[in-house]
Image (cartoon, rainbow, N blue to C red):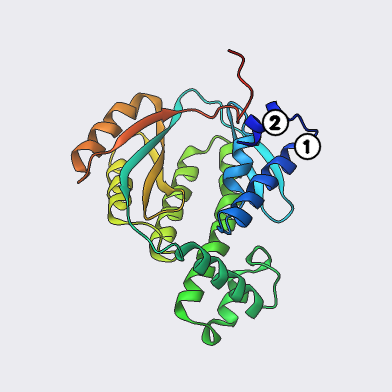
Amino acid sequence: MYTFLEQLNPTTASLTEKALACQKAEHDFANMPCGIMDQFISVMGKANNALLIDCRSVDAKLVPLTDPRVVILVTNSNVRHELTGSEYPMRRQSCFDAAKAMGKKSLREASMQDLDAIKSSITDEMYRLARHVINEIARTTKAVTALESGDYTQFGQLMVQSHESLRDDYEVSCPELDELVASAMEVEGVYGSRMTGGGFGGCTVTLVKTDSVEKAINNMKEKYSGKATFYVCSPCDGAQKLTL
């Protein structure tokens, strides 16, 4: 939307400023205390690159993903479980509370040793939520190293670990997403798979060898209890002006 409005009223805003303005709109008008991931990739995405986002410094780094032997398979579960709307804010607040209990500004500054030290003074739910975030930050750093070195096996293992943590610790997966991830991982040539987005339905992303895509789709269709939609994707540029 920012890119569209910018064509009507040109600005000199930087890409970071554009992304933060979109986040502010979510916070102030939609009353959703979201992060910056969607906004950053929408304006900063570049073809043949993944994007590493530092949510603390709001810096971003392009990570090459150019190997034609692998693609990203996006699978839409076509389910959306009805929620009260409080799930995301509740989890976010619990993570802030856990960081505060450790004397940290955010969980970005915390380690598992810090969290274990206060385990007895917080709820089990808060512990699990914070554990997911702390470990996910570590997985993200490892994932960048794996991509940069072309180690898709390691990257795929980190994807699966991420999904398991989102399912068991952060509790935002659902049976349909779990089915899709499990059926994808049965296929030779699939490196990794995980849910993506806000959870409770929606999509999974799977890193798969190009010549194994058809096998992966067929197995997921066969094993999935619902009716999924599949998209074979490669990283592309973010929102931009189109000349018609």
Q: At 20% from the left edge and 43% from the top edge, which residue is drawn? A: 223
Q: Nearer the viewer, mark 2 or mark 1?
A: 2
Image position of 100 (left or right of 38): right
Q: Is residue 242 above or below residue 21?
A: above
Q: CA distance from mark 2 to mark 1?
A: 10 Å
Q: Residue furthest front?
A: 8
Identify which amino acid the numbered label 1 is placed on. Answer: Ala
Q: Is residue 42 above or below residue 20?
A: above
Image position of 16 (left or right of 176): right
- Residue 166 image position (x, y, % from top left): 43, 59
Task: Classify 10 Å Cα crowding around label 1: few (below 14), some (14-19), many (20 and above).
Answer: few
Looking at the rendered image, the quarter that the C terminus falls into is top right
Residue 128 visible from this viewpoint: yes
Contact check, label 2 and label 1, Cβ < 8 Å: yes
- The residue where tag 2 is placed is 6
- Residue 185 image position (x, y, % from top left): 32, 43
- The residue where tag 1 is placed is 13
